[in-house]
Image (cartoon, coloured by chain):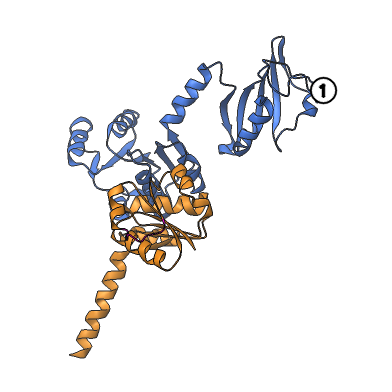
Chain colours: A blue, B orange
């Protein structure tokens, strides 16, 4: 596959090395001549000096025939613009953007850049799973972010302790798909009673996750 | 009209002063407090330190109540990103951004953004002046 990487810093460099090892055709576009030189020394003639947000540069780079376009500069705004140019001017089929500010994930998705990688989010997910006190953990994304799967630990102080699932005012479209109790895992019925320290696996639209949390965890 | 201007440079400050004098509610945002020195001493609006590419900073600046948002920093990409946040996340009614690079400007106009390129506008103006001068000869 022909892959273009924007940004020849550390992430760009190691990513490129990995892709080259897999046998792909690669081009890195980087502004800083010192970084360009370093990449050429270490990886060979795979680097072009230029601004990856400029249509003329991307044209020269043959972006029109690229299979994957990956923007990994340090600045979210530069990654955004590079990806938008690649998408709208060159119709690259697969576009991946690195984002530093996790809040930007929604913006990028709204603008049609489906795949975003945020180091902050990745680390936060690791921490959330380790922290026993954290009641709600994001487990996985279904259907390209339209639905998400969460694990919610019901604290003893929660309003829903002792209630049947049919009595709980769940946000619209949310599903309690499994309940993990001390005695074992159950598929809940409308009459299943929630108890303290139960772990509920819920499927919900991402924007309603906060509401779900306040219903199940709030006291 | 409630206006939020991102970037208190020459254009941002000039516009802020003019709109403020006309009686509009103006908020100016910049990452460098020294830029606010360009505002008139009589400026009645708000000057806030903040980054317009950050959703939370925009919220703190009151973007949800704004009628218009202008992205006028020195960086094309920053302006483009902030304008898209204003338009797509906050639904601000009127969003305008400066994009110096004519090619990028064209792309974003085709994507529905109200992007203005001083480069294009100025060179068109000069072309107009020159063709007038030639006719006069």
- Residue B26 on the magenta segment: no
In the image as oriented, which residue stretches furthest toward the top? A183
User: Which chain does tag 1 point to?
Assistant: A
Stretch in magenta: B39-45
Is residue A45 found left or right of A89 in the rendered image? Answer: left
Q: Position of residue B48 (x, y in %)?
A: 39, 48
Q: Is residue A219 left or right of residue B73?
A: right
User: How far across and down, in percent of the image, does residue A99 sit?
Assistant: 41, 37
Which quadrant of the view contains residue B74?
bottom left
Q: Is residue B108 above or below residue A46?
A: below
Q: Residues within 10 Å of mark 1 (few under 14, many from 20)?
A: few
Residues A134 and A26: in front is A134
Residue drawn at x 30%, y 56% is: B9
Name the magenta segment's main secondary structure. Answer: loop
Please tell me whether mark 1 sits on a helix, a strand or a loop. loop
User: As displayed, is residue B118 above or below residue A83?
Assistant: below
Q: Residue at x 45, y 52 (%)?
A: B84
Q: Is residue B41 magenta?
A: yes
- Rendering coords of residue B60 (x, y %): 47, 45
Residue that protrudes farthest toward the right in the picture = A191
The residue drawn where x is 45% and y is 36% is A102
Residue plotted at (42% across, 57% down): B45
In this figure, what is the number of numbered marks?
1
Please give the residue where the numbered disc 1 appears in the rendered image: A191
- Residue closest to the eye, A89 or B48: B48
Residue B70, quarter of picture: bottom left
Q: Is residue B110 left or right of residue A157?
A: left
A107 is higher (above) or lower (below) than B119: above
The residue closer to the viewer here, A14 or A176, is A176
Judged from this view, the residue extending furthest toward the bottom is B137
């Amino acid at each position: 596959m022909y892959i273009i990487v924007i940004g020849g810093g550390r992430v760009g460099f190691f990513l490129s090395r990995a892709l080259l090892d897999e046998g792909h055709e690669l081009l890195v576009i980087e502004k800083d001549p010192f970084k360009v030189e370093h990449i050429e020394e270490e990886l060979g003639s795979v680097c072009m000096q230029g601004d990856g947000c400029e249509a003329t540069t991307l044209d020269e780079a043959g972006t029109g025939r690229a299979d994957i376009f990956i923007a990994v500069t340090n600045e979210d705004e530069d990654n955004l613009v590079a990806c938008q140019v690649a998408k709208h001017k060159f119709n690259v089929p697969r576009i991946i953007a690195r984002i530093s500010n996790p809040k930007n994930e929604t913006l990028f998705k709204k603008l049609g850049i489906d795949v975003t990688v945020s180091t902050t989010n990745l680390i936060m997910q690791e921490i959330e799973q380790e922290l026993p006190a954290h009641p709600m953990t994001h487990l996985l994304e279904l259907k390209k972010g339209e639905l998400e799967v969460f694990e919610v630990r019901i604290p003893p102080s929660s309003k829903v302790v002792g209630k049947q699932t049919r009595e709980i005012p769940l946000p619209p479209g949310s599903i309690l798909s499994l309940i993990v109790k001390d005695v074992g895992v159950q598929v809940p019925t409308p009459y299943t009673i929630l108890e303290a320290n139960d772990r509920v696996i819920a499927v919900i639209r991402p924007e309603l996750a906060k509401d779900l949390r306040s219903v199940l965890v709030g006291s | 009209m409630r206006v939020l201007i991102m970037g208190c440079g020459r254009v941002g400050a000039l516009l802020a002063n003019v709109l403020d004098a006309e009686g509009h509610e103006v908020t100016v945002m910049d990452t460098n407090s020294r830029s606010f020195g360009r505002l008139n001493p009589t400026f009645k609006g708000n000057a806030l330190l903040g980054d317009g590419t950050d959703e939370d900073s925009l919220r703190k600046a009151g973007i949800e109540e704004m009628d218009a948002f202008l992205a006028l920093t020195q960086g094309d990409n920053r302006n483009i990103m902030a304008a898209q946040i204003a338009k797509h996340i906050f639904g601000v009614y009127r969003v305008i951004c400066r994009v110096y690079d004519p090619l990028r400007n064209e792309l974003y106009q085709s994507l529905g953004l109200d992007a203005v390129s001083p480069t294009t506008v100025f060179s068109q103006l000069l072309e107009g002046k020159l063709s007038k001068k030639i006719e006069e000869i």
